[in-house]
Amino acid sequence: MFETSANKRKHPTYRRGKEPYSLGRLQPNRNLTPEQVAELMLKRPELRLADGPGNLQLAQLLTAIPEDEHLQELFQLITRTQVGQTIICDDPYLGAYPPKGSIIYPSDFLGLATMPTGDPTGLIISQLTGNVLFIGRTKSAKTSLLMVLLSYPQLLKSARIVVFAKKRELRDLSTKPELRDLIITFKLEELVLCYFQPPTGVPETAWNNEITKLIAQCYGRYSAQRLMGDKVRELMAKHPDGVYPTLRQLAGVIDAFKPHFGGREAAYKDSIEWCLKDLLNSTGSIWDYSYSDFLEQLYSQAGLCIVEAEAVAPEHLTFIAVYFMRWIYFKRLYTSEVAS
């Protein structure tokens, strides 16, 4: 190797915080003290030395007989091996995984991946009523992980799963014979939604308040919420039974409202009207229905529903997804329906 100023420079030994032990001390013919052995076992979880029962016994013996050269050599060899495996793994959470074989998996466990310890990790179907977040950088296999999860027939048979996708990969799941009858796919423009129609059993007043807040929250138009709420109540006050106003009619009523020029209400009107018009222009006619049992039928049976929306802006797709979630939440809330 050519001599350079870089490789002539002495590299400092790795030291973890202000702890007295450094990996540079792992050298032949240098014994570890009982304190250093205890630190390696108890304060360096990323080395995972405590996973092996033999390591625990070896550390116990070495603590009692630190002058034994054979114990010293064997323990340092094991420690060096673990240091190398830690470097290769390059996982900042390596020390947080449970010891291998310590987890008891329930019968409805779905294994999605394997931890560095060799044990599987995944989800439990009975606990999926909570929130599950897949987060990662672009091209970090989030979609691939989701496809693994959605390829389990026992999951699709136990719950209605609605996926709003901007990619077409998920439709490939329907090519699997065991999943073919459990998957339906829609283009966004094929949806049939009546925004003002409450779920069965939900009072209209409660639903009116919810759908007013929904637009304000999804688009950050909190100041315009009162104006929009007034127009929603106007539309809903005299509608015939079984026939509800449409979202396009709400946009028309707000457009017809003539506030004083330059006032706050004029700014509120422009703000919320622009959001509604952009939503309608981006999603076509899916909101132009005065009655629809689309969601009632969709949530009446288990399986996977894929809604493909490749060209829709993220804020509009978020609004539609939140609308689907709030719809089923209110239905279960007022009908005491148990989430499947």
Image (cartoon, rainbow, N blue to C red):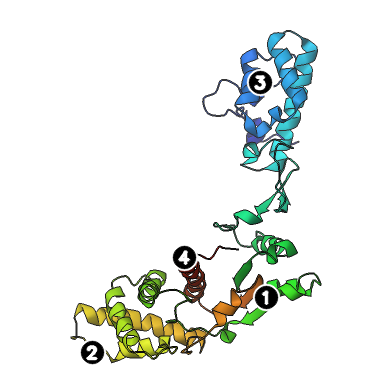
Of circles 2 and 1, the one toward us is 2
- What percent of the width, then of the height, locates residue 33? 65, 13
Label 1, label 3: how far apart the Cα atoms are: 54 Å
Q: Which residue is mark 1?
A: 168
- Indicate the quadrant where residue 306 lies: bottom right
The residue singled out by tag 4 in the image is 333
For disc 2, the marked residue is 258
Distance from Cα at disc 4 to Cα at disc 3 = 62 Å
Q: Earlier in the sequence, mark 2 or mark 3?
A: 3
**Kind of residue at disc 4:** Leu
**Mark closest to the chain's N terminus, 2 or 1:** 1
Question: Eyeballing the image, is 4 above or below 30?
Answer: below
The type of residue carrying mark 2 is Lys
Identify the secondary structure beneath mark 1. Answer: loop
Crowding around mark 1 (Cα neighbors within 10 Å: few <14, some 14 to 19, many 20+) is few
Q: Secondary structure at mark 3?
A: helix
Q: Is residue 190 left or right of residue 175?
A: left
